[in-house]
């Protein structure tokens, strides 16, 4: 019996395929955990959903759609443009500087509530100074690579 | 000793710079010590090892300490680790004792920080001496233990374990590293991913995404509310602070610092757990528990001594085992790797000068934190009035710099930042726990090597149980860490049942 059991635990690993062993075990474990999570949390959740105790909101009921999706779109545009503009000025970090200024300005406008003149001045100054200082300190003083 | 005299002025300058930036980050609600370290990473790229250590440890200590400012003044913890400071700190401020509460918090923070640095100094080398004898089997079990401990302290143990294992899976994407003894073959990859993901996702962009960008997305989703904290500053000018407040608080200070250090030792368990655990213990041991929460110094002391106690504690598993003690030390591990430091059992023995510099930096960071906060708290407090619409865009910009510069200009790292920023935001909505995910991600590759190489050498799974008494002891710890939360849950359910049926 003991011998049978210990032979069951014996494993021979072929070096050529050894890269798949651990990922396979991890995936099996994840599937097993998912089934467990479904049994423990999923079934009661579905029951609540059916009886109307819970609604399918995924915590997104109070989502500020304009600010959230605005941030996402601006961030993607920021990353794309930074790379694109940076190619015109290789190894200077100027792509980062030129794209960061409008990005910070527009994102601040998106985040601010009830914009008045004072806020607009603060936002404009910040959009100019913050990327300027970051670019000068990092790219010029510290020689850190920027897009 | 000669080594200390050879340290440059920049090293001594970087500590206050780090502490000050850390305090400001800690004091701004929603921004954490982890974020401070993540966002300031690009600064360390240009520094040498000692200077980077000064900056990073300063940021860590400052970040954890700064959280008490908004906790006391506006009832919002600046970092999760100062959550219990609000319980008594804010009522004290409401009574006109804001300055007194802040200074009590600062002195307690100093005590907690120095206490845990002392424990670190003696305990980390001892633990490393034990860990040096570990073979791959024990090392694998230590990682397994780290994952089960952190999962068991998560909101839901199942989700905690799932998050940790998911982190391990994501870390395996890419080639099975030849340098570590793998066969160099790709796995978990589609053909178009091979160019960018040969070495998998870089650690730091992942961390900066999870702790920097995800936080900003969360703020955007909540509409970036504008808080009016101006009134709170008016509360600063009343009751004066005197050290006499600490009379009779020695036990509270030592107990809270010890709890913080112990919680720090547990892998991946953060400051909020330390703060709450220490507060509840303080209340349980108090002669007048009913006064807790009404604005008494005891509560502020308990919370603040414990969260700074965490700092030294969290560095113990980091430096002796290579396992981060909390999310900030997880970012530190990335920053250290960048400086060429490989943390693990051999670290202290092989690098005594770096180890001593680190201890000196930690000690100085605590002292500088005290001086800066104690004497200029009125000015630091003003940071809570800086609006988010100014700060948040700057944070995104700094996240980009950190991610882009890490591998000397790889644009894919910036996209990694976005992928994990979104994952961090959405994942938390469906119950993914970030701390276990990170620990799994950091330790996943090592876990694979230890596991596969152990099996290649011994050819049987039984080796994980029979290799040594230490392996068996680690299994006992793993089982205990899994059984403990189940026991607590069953006990709580029984108590509730007893109450609802009118039983004793």
Image: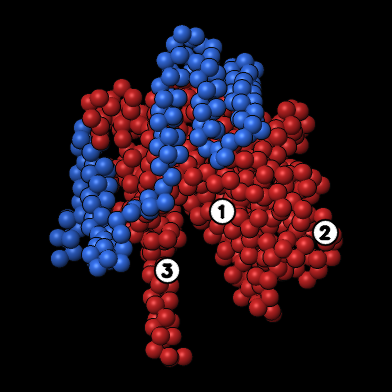
Chain colours: A blue, B red
Q: Which of the two marks, 1 or 3, is nearer to us in this view?
A: 1
Residue highlighted by disc 2 = B238
Who's the residue at 30% across and 67% down the image?
A: A53
Task: Choose between B186 and B503: the one closer to the eye.
Answer: B503
Of the residues tagged 2 and 1, which is closer to the observer?
Answer: 2
Q: Position of residue A115 (x, y in %)?
A: 58, 36
**Residues at circles 2 and 1 in contact by the CB criterion of under 8 Å:** no
**Is B475 situated left or right of B327 in this image?**
left
Q: Nearer the viewer, mark 3 or mark 2?
A: 2
Residue B500 to residue B446: above or below:
below
Location of the N terminus of chain A (image quadrant): bottom left
Q: In the image, what residue occupies the spot 61% across and 75% down?
A: B284
Q: Earlier in the sequence, mark 1 or mark 3?
A: 1
Q: Which residue is mark 1?
A: B80
Disc 2 element = loop
Judge left or right: residue A7 versus residue B172.
left
Q: Is residue B72 visible?
A: yes
Q: Residue placed at 69% from the left, 79% from the top?
A: B288
- In this view, B23 is above or below B237: above
Crowding at dot 2, Cα within 10 Å, few <14 / some 14-19 / many 20+, comes out as some
Report, in whole angstroms, how far the alpha carbon at label 2 lies from the one at label 1. Answer: 27 Å
Task: State the residue position of label 3.
Answer: B484
Name the one closer to the observer, B475 or B443: B443
């Amino acid at each position: 019996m003991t011998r049978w059991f210990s032979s069951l635990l014996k494993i021979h690993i072929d070096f050529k395929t050894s890269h798949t062993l651990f990922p396979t075990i991890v995936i099996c474990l994840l599937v097993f955990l998912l089934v467990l999570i479904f049994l423990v949390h999923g079934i009661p959740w579905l029951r609540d959903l059916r009886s109307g105790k819970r609604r399918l909101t995924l915590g997104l009921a109070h989502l500020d759609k304009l600010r959230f999706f605005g941030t996402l779109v601006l961030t993607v545009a920021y990353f794309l443009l930074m790379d694109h503009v940076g190619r015109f000025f290789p190894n200077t970090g100027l792509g980062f500087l030129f794209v960061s200024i409008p990005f910070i300005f527009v994102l601040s406008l998106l985040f601010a509530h009830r914009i008045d003149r004072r806020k607009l001045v603060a936002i404009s100054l910040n959009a100019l100074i913050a990327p300027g200082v970051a670019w000068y300190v990092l790219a010029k003083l510290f020689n850190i690579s920027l897009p | 000793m000669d080594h200390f005299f050879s340290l440059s002025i920049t090293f001594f300058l970087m500590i206050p710079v780090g502490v000050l930036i850390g305090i400001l980050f800690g004091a701004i609600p929603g921004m954490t010590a982890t974020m401070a370290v993540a966002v300031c990473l690009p600064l360390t790229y240009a520094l040498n090892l000692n200077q980077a250590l000064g900056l990073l440890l300063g940021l860590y200590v400052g970040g954890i300490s700064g959280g008490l400012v908004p906790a006391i003044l506006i009832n919002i913890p600046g970092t999760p680790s100062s959550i219990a400071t609000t319980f008594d700190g804010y009522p004290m401020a409401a009574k006109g004792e804001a300055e007194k509460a802040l200074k009590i918090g600062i002195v307690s923070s100093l005590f907690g920080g120095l206490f845990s640095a002392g424990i670190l100094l003696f305990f980390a080398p001892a633990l490393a001496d034990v860990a040096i004898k570990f073979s791959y089997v024990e090392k694998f079990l230590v990682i397994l233990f780290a994952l089960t401990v952190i999962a068991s302290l998560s909101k839901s143990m199942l989700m905690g374990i799932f998050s940790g294992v998911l982190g391990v899976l994501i870390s395996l994407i890419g080639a099975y590293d030849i340098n570590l003894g793998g066969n160099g073959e790709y796995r978990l990859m589609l053909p178009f991913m091979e160019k960018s993901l040969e070495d998998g996702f870089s650690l730091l962009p992942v961390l900066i995404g999870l702790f920097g960008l995800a936080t900003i997305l969360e703020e955007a989703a909540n509409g970036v509310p504008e808080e009016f904290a101006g009134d709170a500053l008016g509360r600063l000018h009343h009751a004066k602070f005197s050290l006499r407040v600490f009379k009779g608080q020695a036990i509270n200070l030592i107990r809270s610092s010890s709890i913080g250090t112990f919680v720090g030792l547990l892998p991946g368990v953060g400051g909020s757990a330390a703060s709450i655990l220490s507060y509840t213990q303080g209340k349980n041991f108090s002669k007048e528990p009913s006064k807790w929460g009404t604005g008494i110094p005891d509560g502020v002391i308990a919370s603040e001594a414990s969260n700074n106690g965490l700092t030294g504690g969290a560095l113990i598993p980091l430096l002796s085992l290579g396992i981060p003690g909390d999310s900030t030390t997880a970012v530190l591990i990335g920053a250290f790797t960048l400086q060429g430091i490989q943390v693990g059992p051999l670290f202290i023995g092989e690098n005594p000068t770096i180890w001593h510099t680190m201890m000196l930096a930690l000690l100085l960071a605590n002292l500088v934190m005290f001086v800066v906060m104690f004497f200029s708290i009125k000015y630091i407090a003003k940071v809570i009035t800086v609006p988010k619409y100014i700060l948040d865009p700057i944070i995104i910009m700094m996240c980009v710099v950190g991610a882009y510069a890490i591998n000397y200009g790889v644009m894919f790292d910036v996209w990694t930042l976005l992928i994990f920023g979104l994952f961090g935001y959405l994942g938390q909505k469906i119950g993914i726990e970030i701390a276990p995910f990170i620990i799994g991600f950091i330790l996943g590759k090592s876990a694979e090597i230890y596991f596969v190489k152990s099996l290649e050498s011994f050819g049987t799974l039984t080796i994980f149980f029979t290799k040594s008494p230490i392996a068996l002891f680690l299994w006992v710890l793993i089982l205990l860490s899994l059984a403990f939360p189940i026991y607590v849950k069953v006990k709580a359910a029984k108590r509730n049942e007893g109450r609802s049926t009118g039983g004793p």
